[in-house]
Image: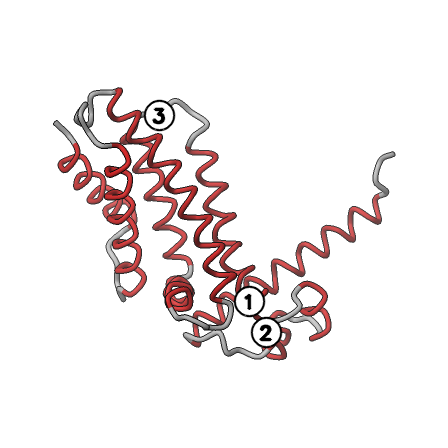
């Protein structure tokens, strides 16, 4: 049976409100540099009742996890598009870099907070944040593994390359760049940063 129009409209409104709460929370968490932002303030800034926030999130820990999860979902969508075509290893690496750098640039303060929260034992939301960040990391490993294998097949990387080690090294390089970029007051353009990392990787793993 087809879903009735009013039900579909209600679902759209629910999704919009949830996204609105998440977007507002991510901004406030980043601006304050702490997860200690009251649910009352989040509700006011999002333009909804306090009770509405609790309809979607039982507590602030769940809300923080949802903020990181939204970053993961955005990256996953970008990655899915990247791997739909038959692009080269270099093109795929650059596309991934543009995607992750762009996400950091959208919310650098929140990215810094998420990293700090994950590394602080017992911090509010640390378990949820860690899980969401782990999913981002696993997706990144899968994508980089494909890029390394493709690069070897194209003759771009050394044939005797230890693929697992290569994936780790590339991942460490990307993580380091993201961490530094999130703290830079005036980072270089995304395209320039992506090109610099690509050149670094190609020189290190190429023949």
- Mark 2 residue element: helix
Residue indicated by mark 2? 42
- Looking at the image, is 181 positioned above or below residue 141? below
Question: Could you tell me residue 61's position as x and y percent?
Answer: 56, 68
Q: Which quadrant of the figure contains the C terminus?
A: top left
Residue 78 x/y as whole percent: 45, 40
Marked residue nearer the N-terminal end (3 or 1): 1
Disc 3 + disc 1, Cβ < 8 Å:
no
Q: Residues within 10 Å of mark 2 (few under 14, many from 20)?
A: many
**Which residue shows up at 24% across the image and 54% down it?**
188
Q: Measure the alpha-carbon separation of dots 2 and 1.
A: 7 Å
Identify the mark at residue 24; answer none if there is no mark: 1
Whether the residues at callouts 3 and 2 have beta carbons within 8 Å, the answer is: no
91 or 34, nearer to the observer: 34
Q: Earlier in the sequence, mark 2 or mark 1?
A: 1
- Mark 3–mark 2 distance (CA, rounded to whole Å): 42 Å
Mark 1 element type: helix
Q: Residue 197, how many percent across, how many down? A: 22, 44
Q: Position of residue 1 (x, y in %)?
A: 87, 34
Q: Residues within 10 Å of mark 3 (few under 14, many from 20)?
A: few
Residue 185's place in the image compared with 150, above or below, is below
Residue at 44% x, 51% y is 134
Tell me whether circle 2 and circle 1 mark residues in contact (CB < 8 Å).
yes
Q: What residue would you read off at disc 3?
A: 87
């Amino acid at each position: 049976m087809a879903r009735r129009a009013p039900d579909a409209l209600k679902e759209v409104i629910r999704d919009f409100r949830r996204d609105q709460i998440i977007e507002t929370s991510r901004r406030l968490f980043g601006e304050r540099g702490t997860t200690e932002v009251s649910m009352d303030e989040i509700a006011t800034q999002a333009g909804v009742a306090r009770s509405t926030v609790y309809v979607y999130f039982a507590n602030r820990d769940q809300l923080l996890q949802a903020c990181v999860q939204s970053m993961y979902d955005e990256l996953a969508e970008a990655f899915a598009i990247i791997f739909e075509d038959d692009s080269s290893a270099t093109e795929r690496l650059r596309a991934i870099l543009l995607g992750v750098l762009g996400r950091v640039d959208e919310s650098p303060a929140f990215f810094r907070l998420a990293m700090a929260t994950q590394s602080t034992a017992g911090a509010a939301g640390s378990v949820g944040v860690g899980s969401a960040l782990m999913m981002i990391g696993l997706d990144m490993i899968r994508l980089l593994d494909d890029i390394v294998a493709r690069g070897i097949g194209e003759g771009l990387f050394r044939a005797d390359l230890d693929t697992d080690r290569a994936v780790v090294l590339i991942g460490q390089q990307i993580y380091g760049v993201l961490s530094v970029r999130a703290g830079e007051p005036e980072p270089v353009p995304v395209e320039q940063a992506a090109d610099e990392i690509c050149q670094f990787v190609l020189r290190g793993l190429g023949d």
